[in-house]
Image (cartoon, helix red, strand yellow):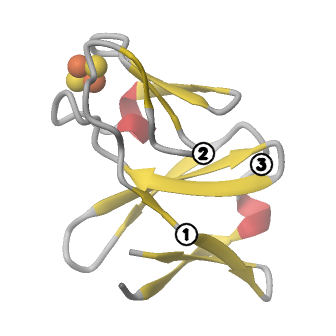
Amino acid sequence: MRKFAAFAAAELAPGEMRKLALPDERAIAIYNVAGKFYATDDLCTHGEVSLTEEGVLNGHIIECSWHFGSFDVTTGKVMTTPCNRDLPTYPVCEIDGVLHVEA
Ligand code: FES
């Protein structure tokens, strides 16, 4: 795993999420849940849908708007079918005000 600098923590308010494109073309979703930061794969495991573009973050639950499957962004666990595979999660840390993701 490598550590990637994302963006300033202050740019992501509580309740917001943002996509981070990695150099190897993977995309990570970073979430601010009540002041704590979490990261998962950006693609829904049910389809090739960007959760940051098509999903709705409600507390710690991201719901995919395509078929309304949902995940807990703090653990990656599936909360609602039709999704049946958990989202991979990644450690996030803040260094000098900048979020970094290990992916
Ligand atoms: S593509 Fe996300 S729930 Fe179906």
Per the model, the C-alpha gap separating discs 1 and 2 is: 10 Å
Mark 3 or 2: in front is 2
Quadrant containing ligand 1 reads top left
Residue type, mark 2 in image: Thr
- Which picture quadrant has residue 48? top left
> Residues under labels 1 and 3: Cα distance?
18 Å
Q: Are marks 1 and 3 in contact (CB under 8 Å)?
A: no
Q: Residue at x 47, y 86 (%)?
A: 3
- Mark 1 and mark 2 lie on one chain; the one further toward the N terminus is 2
Q: Is residue 75 left or right of residue 93?
A: left
Residue picked out by circle 3: 13
**Residue 16 vertical position relative to residue 92 in the rendered view, above or below:** above
- Report how far apart the C-alphas of labels 3 and 2 lie in the structure: 16 Å
Q: Which mark is residue 74?
A: 2
Please state if 25 lies on the left or on the right of 43 as rendered.
left
Position of residue 98 relative to residue 73, above or below, is: below
Q: SS at mark 1?
A: loop
| Rendering quarter of residue 23 | bottom left
Dots 3, 2 in contact, CB < 8 A? no
Q: Amino acid at mark 3?
A: Ala
User: Which of the labelled discs sits on residue 91, or is there none?
Assistant: 1
Categorize mark 1 by other alpha carbons within 10 Å: few (<14), some (14-19), many (20+). Answer: few
Query: Which of disc 3 and disc 1 is earlier in sequence?
Result: 3
Numbered circle sitting on residue 73: none
Mark sitting earlier along the chain (3/2) = 3
Q: Residue at x 38, y 75 (%)?
A: 103
